[in-house]
Image: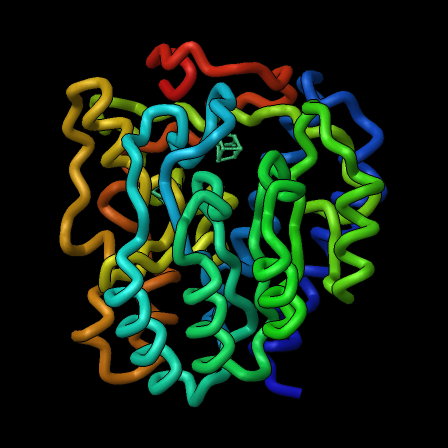
Amino acid sequence: MNQNIRDRNYYSNVLRFFRDNIVKIIPEKSLLFKWLCLIGFKIAAKKKHILRTSMKIDIPAVEHCNLSCKCCTAFGPLAQKSFIDVESYKRDMEKLALLTNSQLESVCFTGGEPLLHPRLLEMFDIARSCFPNTELSFMTNGVLLLKMEKEFWDNCGKNNICIGLSRYPIKLDIDKIKEIAEEYKIRFDYVGGASTPIKAMWKYPLDIEGKQPLSRSFNICNQVNSCIRMKDGKIYPCNTIACIEHFNRYFGKNLEVTEQDVIEIKKVNNISEIYEFLIKPKSFCKYCNRKGIQFGIEWGISKKDISEWV
Ligand code: SF4
Ligand code: SF4
């Protein structure tokens, strides 16, 4: 077995064991939980510095959201209406298919709330045509699921799109959603697995002054080499960099994204250039106070106060 794959799998298994057997039974608000998570992030850092051999990619179909959760890590409550440009998305997917020989680990449509995009089904078709064997899914808060037309369910069935439901404490008719998914033979699961608890929020505080030790932030960041986003011709190494424009605009700040923080897909000649980019610390990491992370924040509606993100 390829050494890279064995190492990534090894660390994945350690982390899964850690998550399913230890972290899960400890209250998220406790210091012990935070301590264990920071240790978990350190173990994860070993995996993060191993070059990928395949890629999982998130496509933020829209950046705004029909829920407005406090501390949203995609800054959804602060985002103006913005839909991914389908023509640009198609170019990016075709280039990525060329670079990877149509082999990606997974593509997940996310947001904000992806079901708000009026051309989502076209995007599903493009993804399936570029990546015939790749795991395709979308991550939703579920609010719109029962309002979707038959055409939507048919398309999910045809393209083998899996539903990932984030488990917020909101009223949803889960039985009905499952019934329809079953009828159309669509896989359905909660994000984090069937036994995932109701979601509490995590706050990843930003340091507006940008005074955090860059390598330390990077080394204990759980998004590194894992939350990879693609939009508007660029690959972003994490949600924070991909979505910071909403924070900057809403609060009149300038947490700067430099050329070194993103990679332009049209300039990439070989997929390994992307894999290498993903394991290098980014200049933007100086804005992330990863040690100040807070867990177990009770879910609630955002007041759009800067204290939710700093
Ligand atoms: S549902 Fe998700 S994307 Fe929307 S505001 Fe809540 S955390 Fe953010
Ligand atoms: S900027 Fe760096 S530390 Fe912050 S979320 Fe992205 S990768 Fe992690």
- Residue 91, quarter of the rendered image: bottom left
Spot occupied by residue 41 in the image (x, y as percentages of width and height): 57, 43
Q: Where is residue 28 shown, x and y percent of the image?
A: 70, 23
Q: Using the rendered image of the protein, determine whether residue 63 is visible from the camera's viewpoint.
A: yes
Q: Where does the N terminus fall, quadrant-wise?
A: bottom right
Quadrant assignment for ligand 2? top left
Question: Can residue 214 be seen at all in this image of the molecule?
Answer: no
Drawn side of residue 235 relative to residue 175, left or right: left
Q: Is residue 191 above or below residue 77?
A: below
As rendered, which of 187 and 145 lies closer to the eye?
A: 145
| Nearest the eye: 87 or 94 | 87
**Which residue is at 23% across, 52% downward?**
261
Give percent across and percent down for residue 62.
Answer: 38, 45
- Figure check: 252 above or below 18: above
In the image: residue 62, left or right of residue 157: left
Looking at the picture, how far across and down is residue 175, in whole percent?
A: 84, 41
Q: Quadrant of the C terminus?
A: top left
The image's colour scheme reads rainbow
Q: Residue furthest front?
A: 150
The mark total stands at 0
- Residue 3 occupies quadrant: bottom right
* Residue ID at (39%, 82%): 97
Q: In the picture shown, does residue 130 fall above or below 242?
A: below
